[in-house]
């Protein structure tokens, strides 16, 4: 029996100033699935995310989160989401824990134990009482994720989450996202323009170009594409063969 969807987009469209930015996007996301939304800058990724989280309304189509419409059941739908769009916004003059307490005050279901648990999940237990102004970019990202998941969301949305991270920071981030998906049964929606990042982190990917999803595939199927034969049409085949033999 298939699990119920965490996120369902149906014929999602957005027109701004007469230009269609998002063109009929359909996708389904399930618990513990890490979903990559891959496309170049300007492809419509962030506009799609803004419709998912209710920052802008669709021109046409629907967004459903855990069975609730973002348009018609906004509060219930959004209660199942944690998200970081662009970069986490924190008070740098406060400590990490003070920042988390500020957010926890808005959600009475978040206990002291849950705060402790999410700090350990993201690996900040040794620095959570330091001021955020002393944090590296990777640490601020982890604190942002702690804030996003402390209410136990069913869906975590991350927009270009590894921008600016060094290779070590990217590895730590990937491991954290996998743990959250599998240990917390959380569906994770990751927007990125980097194919390698999506390959290393996600289970399934939708490729968006100029507002349209052109392909949705499992990541291992993308990897198998590298095994396909590639044909080149050359103006001077003999010269190409000579160069290949030489190098």
Image (cartoon, helix red, strand yellow):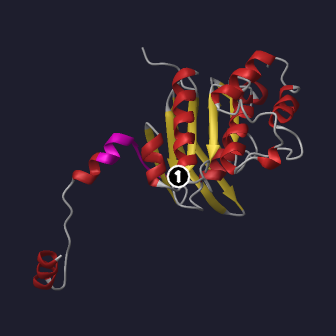
Quadrant for the C terminus in the image: bottom left
Reading the image, the residue beneath label 1 is 167
Tell whether 223 sits left or right of 28: left
Q: Is residue 221 magenta?
A: yes
Residue 77: quadrant of the picture: top right
User: What is the count of numbered marks?
Assistant: 1
Residue drawn where x is 86% and y is 29% of the image? 101
Tell whether 202 sits left or right of 229: right
Residue 228: quadrant of the picture: bottom left
Nearer-the-camera pick, 243 or 75: 243
Tell whether 139 sits left or right of 133: left
Residue 62: quadrant of the picture: top right
Q: Decide: is 104 above or below 10.
A: above
Q: Is residue 64 magenta?
A: no
Residue drawn where x is 46% and y is 39% of the image? 202
Coordinates of residue 157 in the picture (x, y in percent): 63, 39
Coordinates of residue 160 in the picture (x, y in percent): 61, 51
Label 1: how many Cα within 10 Å (few below 14, some 14–19, many 20+): few
Q: Decide: is 48 above or below 180.
A: below
Coordinates of residue 152 in the picture (x, y in percent): 69, 22
Q: Residue furthest top?
A: 1
Q: Decide: is 153 above or below 161.
A: above
**Where are the magenta residues, as a range?**
213-223
Element type at mark 1: helix
Residue drawn where x is 76% and y is 44% of the image? 55
Residue drawn where x is 79% and y is 46% of the image? 89
């Amino acid at each position: 029996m298939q699990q119920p969807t965490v996120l369902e987009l149906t014929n999602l469209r957005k027109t701004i100033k007469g230009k269609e930015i998002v063109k009929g996007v359909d996708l389904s996301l399930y618990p513990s699935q890490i979903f990559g939304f891959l496309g170049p800058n300007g492809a419509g990724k962030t506009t799609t995310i803004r419709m998912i989280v209710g920052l802008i309304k669709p021109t046409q189509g629907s967004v459903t989160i855990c069975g609730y419409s973002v348009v018609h059941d906004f509060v219930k739908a959004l209660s199942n989401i944690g998200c970081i769009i662009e970069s986490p916004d924190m008070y740098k003059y406060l400590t990490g824990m003070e920042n988390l307490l500020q957010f926890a005050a808005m959600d009475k279901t978040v206990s002291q134990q849950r705060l402790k648990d999410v700090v350990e999940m993201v690996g900040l237990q040794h620095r959570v009482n330091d001021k955020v102004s002393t944090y590296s970019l990777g640490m601020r990202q982890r604190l942002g994720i702690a804030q996003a998941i402390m209410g136990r969301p069913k869906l975590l949305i991350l927009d270009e989450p590894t921008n600016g991270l060094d290779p070590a920071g990217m590895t730590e981030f990937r491991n954290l996202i996998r743990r959250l998906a599998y240990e917390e049964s959380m569906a994770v929606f990751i927007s990125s323009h980097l194919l390698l990042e999506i390959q290393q982190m996600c289970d399934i990917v939708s490729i968006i170009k100029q507002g349209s999803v052109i392909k949705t595939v499992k990541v291992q199927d993308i990897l198998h594409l590298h095994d396909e034969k590639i044909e080149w049409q050359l103006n001077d085949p003999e010269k190409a063969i000579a160069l290949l033999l030489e190098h």
